[in-house]
Amino acid sequence: MAGDRELVLAANKAFYRSFEKKDLEAMEAVWSKGMGCLCIHPGRDALKGWADIRDAWERIFQNTSYLEVDIDILTVEVSGDLAYVVLIENVLQISSGRRLEGQSMATNGFERMAGQWYMIHHHGSPVVD
C-alpha cells in the first residue's frame, strides 16, 4: 500500500493533469467541495469555495487553446490528515494566438477525507527574474 506522501503526490499529479488537459470534470474530482477551499491564481484575488474556483478554472480552460505544465517539486509535508506540496510551475500557455511562458512558485494544500486526498488550497505566485 502506498504511503501518505505517495498518495498526496498522486493527488497533486491528478491536479496538474486536469490543468494541462483543460478537463473540468477531472479538476472537480481533485478538489474538495468545502466552503473553506481557497485558490489564488498568480496576480489574482483569492477565490473561496468550490463554485467560484470552478468558474475561474472554466474561464481559464475556455480562453486557452493549449497548456503545458512542468513542475519541480521542492517539498512535500504530511501531518495527519493535512498535507502540502511546494513546487515551481513552468507553464506554457497559448491563448488568443499568443504564446505565454511563465514560472510560478506554488503551494498546494490537501486534506484527507474518507480515505482520499482532496485539494483544499492552491496558491501560485509569479517568479520574476
Image: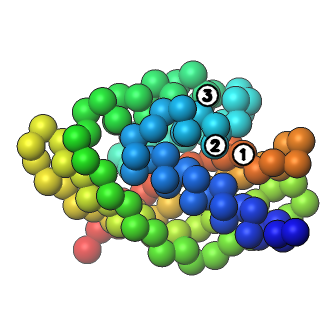
**Quadrant showing the C terminus:** bottom left
Q: Contact, CB < 8 Å: mark 3 with mark 2?
A: no
Please identify the quarter of the rendering in which residue 70 is found: bottom left
**Residue 28 left/right relative to 129:** right
Does dot 3 land on a helix, a strand or a loop? helix
The answer to which of marks 3 and 2 sits earlier in the sequence is: 2
Which residue sits at x=51%, y=28%?
54
The kind of residue tagged 2 is Val
Q: Position of residue 99 (x, y in %)?
A: 14, 54
Residues 103 and 58: in front is: 58
- Label 1, on which residue? 118
Q: Is residue 45 visible?
A: no
* Location of residue 48 with respect to 116 vertically, above or below: above
Task: Give me the C-alpha separation between circle 3 and circle 2.
Answer: 11 Å
Q: Position of residue 119 (x, y in %)?
A: 67, 46
**Residue 68 percent location from the top left of the image:** 32, 58
Using the image, determine if residue 71 lies above or below residue 37: below
Residue 30's label in the rendered image is 2
User: Could you say which disc has been placed on residue 50 in the image?
Assistant: 3
The answer to whether residue 18 is left or right of residue 115 is left
Q: In the structure shown, which secondary structural element does the residue marked by tag 1 occupy?
A: strand
